[in-house]
Amino acid sequence: MGWLRRFRNTISSSNPDDFAEETRFHFDECIDEYMKSGMTYEQARLEAHRRLGNLALATEQARDVDTFRWLGDLGQDVRYALRQLRRNPGFALAAVLTLALGIGTTTAVFSVVDAVVLRPLSYADSSRLVIIDEWIPSVGAIPVNAVHFQGWQRTARSFDQIALVGGLTVNVTDSTEPERLPAGRVSSELFPLLGVRPQLGRVFLADEDVLGRDHVVVITNELWRRRYSADPRVVGRFISIDGVAHQVVGVLPASFHFPKLSHLYPLTIVQDSPQIWKPIGLRPEELTPADFNFVSIGRLKAGVSATQAASELDAVQKDFSVQMPKSVGPDLRSKVLPLQDRIVGRAKTGLNLMLTAVGVVLFIGCVNITNLLLARLSSRRRELAVRSAIGASRWRLIRQMIVESLTLSAVGGACGMLIAYGAIRLILMIAPADVPRLDEVHVDARTLMFTLIISSIAGLVIGLSPAWRSGNTDAGEAMASRTPTASRGSGRLRFVLVSAQVTLSAVCLIVAGLLLHSLVNLLNVDRGFDTNHIMTVGVNLPISRYPTPEKRVQFVRTVLDRLKALPGAIDVAAANMLPLAGEGGNAALSMPGTRGPLFERALGNIRTVSGDYFRTMGMSLQAGRLFSDADRERQVAVISMSIAKRAWPGEDPIGKRFRFGPPTFPDREVIGVINDVRGVSLEGGPSFSVYVPYWQGPFIPDTSFAVKTTADPVAIAPAIRAAIRSIDAELPLSAMRTMEDVVEGSVAQRRFQTNLVLAFGLAAMLLASLGVYGVMSFAVTQRTTEIGIRLAMGAERGAVLRMVLRQALRPVAAGVAAAVPLAFGAALWLRSLLFGVSPQDPTTITVACLALTVAAMLAAYLPARRAANLDPLNALRYE
Amino acid sequence: MLRKPKKPDAVQGTLDLLVLKTLSREPQHGYGVAAHIQQITDDALRVEEGSLYPALHRMEQAGWIAAEWRITEKKRRARIYRLTRAGQKRLSEEEAKWKRLFEAVGKVLRFA
């Protein structure tokens, strides 16, 4: 336990007073002795002083005995390392810059991954929070039925609490500008369950869950600051939500983050994080067996696993299955999933990929520095030999090298921290909004810790092989050789390192290529609608002011007429949901006479549209006809090809009749078949769409308008806004987007990932090429004499060029060859991110490998040309 | 933490041996150790204070000797060193080593 003793030593005998007293005692005894031999006190004192003249030195030495001497040596090593760096400013700059960029970007990506994936959700004891889905084996996970939820709440013992959450969009009107806001409906259990206390006022009471008593709202800190200027008197005030007065009872704290509701639902929907919350207030139609529209969040009792909870719920679900009418009764079960997995699940692979890619780039950069250090080491062999000869131990030399590389990485890490700060802001700026939890990303102690760790690892990575080399310095041999030549071993090591760089960057490039290929495939997919020159806008008609279907239809019709009259508008259309906006209303199609279970019938996505919708969106009629205003009373529908095939396989669907909704709903006639459209996302298959005239549809208050224009669609936006405002000035409008923006938005996350990975891949390629360049330059310098002799003996310059290139090709080819199986593995891991391209796509792999080889050979060409152009006379004189 | 194994040179080893041997008789302060060595060897060996105190502190850290403050007969506060059990062991090792060296050198002197 040498360190313990040393530590004690620093405490006990480093006390200078102790030692001073000990010396004084010695001094006094000397004086006594001299006086005994007959000296006067003065003489004795002088004599003692003379004898103990080295007293100060002795003090120093006694104190320094072994006390953290290595610390002193370390300081010396660091000073020496800094001196070395100052002596080679070019090398120092290149190394620090590489490290700073590498560590900076790695830290930035880590802080995003940390906030999104790794860090537990910011709720009390969040590991026990789960999301509960209904589960039908033949269908998959579906949202929750309110009646079932109430059943779980009564009987399930696995949970402390469970809560019901639903999403909606509301129009908020008060003294300021009307606004359309994402909102949440929650049962009173939600906030206590999450451990959230309001910063002002209160959250919901249990009796406010009941319809009629639910005219209260709680607002987020963000809305409170933005819309109400953080005025505490907002609590108690009445604001109008969809035209109905609601009292603000509380303000949530700034620390409260709630995920986007679209991240909670098991289906693809588009629903933002709520800014305003109201009690669940279940309506009678929501308490029916066929309504599956909610999300349920639960808190497991301590020690209960998600699987146990699910099996308990399954027993309850079985009762519901039995109670359901035979025609509906599916095999109903439940699924319990950690809340965090649901929220980050979809973004996880992509983020981990980015972190891996940026880490690989950092590693390749480190290897470049290692190669530089190794090359420099050969020219420093003599220095090392001298140090070794005058007594530096092997360990001391190794430590010197490690300290040098750690000094480099410490400086690089410090600069990297600054870069990380900027890079995080950049990532947040360009990151698409549908990455969950981005609002929780920030620089903190964990980020700093990560930088520290990654810098130390980088320092060890770059220093390890030079240190090992320097430890093996043979003083005699190094002193004997006149020119600084590297041993064969060090050259071999450098080529191995270059191969590794090539392998890793090839894998990066291949993966980036596969992602790029997927993105291109996705953008070229037959989406089924046109995006050229189309401007869109959404409105939400509040029930208070548009209580009847007639009023809504009237509003839509007036808007369509006004828009049609706008100069530059070719076609105008209305729809409850535009393509890629999601699948709002799904309903099982019931054909007259069929009696299969509800969940086994064809499920159609009901879209209410105006007659011109198909032409505006550039869709093509496959059979039959489209509907028009003439079909005012006739119950008609246009269906997509996919649902035609699903519902009437092998038959002509035109003229067939079907019904959706309860048996009281009328039968409809299929009058036309239209091409398939991607309704939710480009990745997902085409929607099973059923289009019905908006004047007949189920009257969902959301309506979007699309205007096809002759010129730039952005130019017409103000006119569209003015036209709608002229009909209803209080109606808030959603952001106006062109259809191109809508498509772009739907691939934003993928484009972001692809761009980042591609950037990292290209950076890796560049760094690997630099590595090849460095190693080949050094090899050529080392072989100057040999090449000079070859040229003097009459070797052709072309042959020399080829010889050097051949030397470079070997590690590059080996690296590329090793990359292919590695890339297979990486692509399998990333299969969920690929679209329309096989993980082993030969084209992508070939192109990536070729690009890398060409880049590496270009890098090797420069030193090769230098070798070929050597003047043999100069080369030999160099010796 | 890697440390260079300490290889004390011959002179230092001898000083250690002398100090340990002196302390094995009775606990003693630094001045007493130096005086004793000088006296026993009839002034042939003079221990420099500059070597003695570092040696004492080094051996204290090594755990061979222990020190405490005591008041001497002359009413002065002195740091008294005494041999520990580890020091005892060390002393017998050093003595054996010294004997071997002494015999070896003796043989060389006799037969060379």
Image (tube, coloured by chain):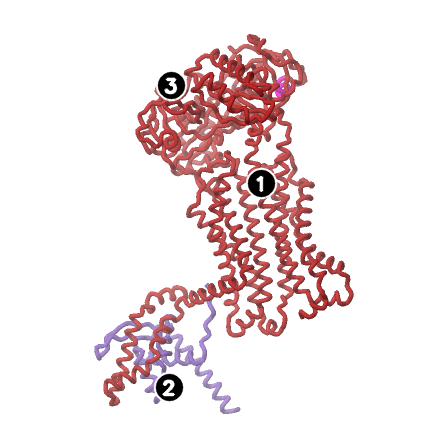
Chain colours: A red, B purple
Image position of A314 with respect to A420: above or below: above
Q: Which chain carries label 2?
A: B
Which mark, by number, is residue A244? 3
Q: How far apart are marks 2 and 1 (CA)?
A: 81 Å
Q: Mark 1 lies on which chain?
A: A
**Mostly what secondary structure, the magenta segment?**
helix
Say whether marks 1 and 3 touch (CB < 8 Å): no
* Displayed quadrant of residue A3: bottom left
Same chain for the residues at labels 3 and 2, yes or no? no
Q: Is residue A299 visible?
A: yes
Mark 3 element type? strand
In this rendering, would A579 be left or right of A187?
A: right
For the residue marked with disc 3, what is the amino acid? Val
For the residue marked with disc 2, what is the amino acid? Leu
Label 2 belongs to which residue?
Answer: B45
Label 1 belongs to which residue?
Answer: A755
Q: Where is residue A685 in the image (x, y as percent from the top left)?
A: 61, 27
Q: Mark 3 lies on which chain?
A: A
State the residue lying farthest toward the front. A567
Image position of A387 with respect to A569: above or below: below
Quadrant showing the N terminus of chain B = bottom left
**Residues rendered magenta in the picture:** A640-647
Precedes in sequence: disc 1 or disc 3: 3
Same chain for the residues at labels 2 and 1, yes or no? no
Comparing B53 with A601, the one in front is B53
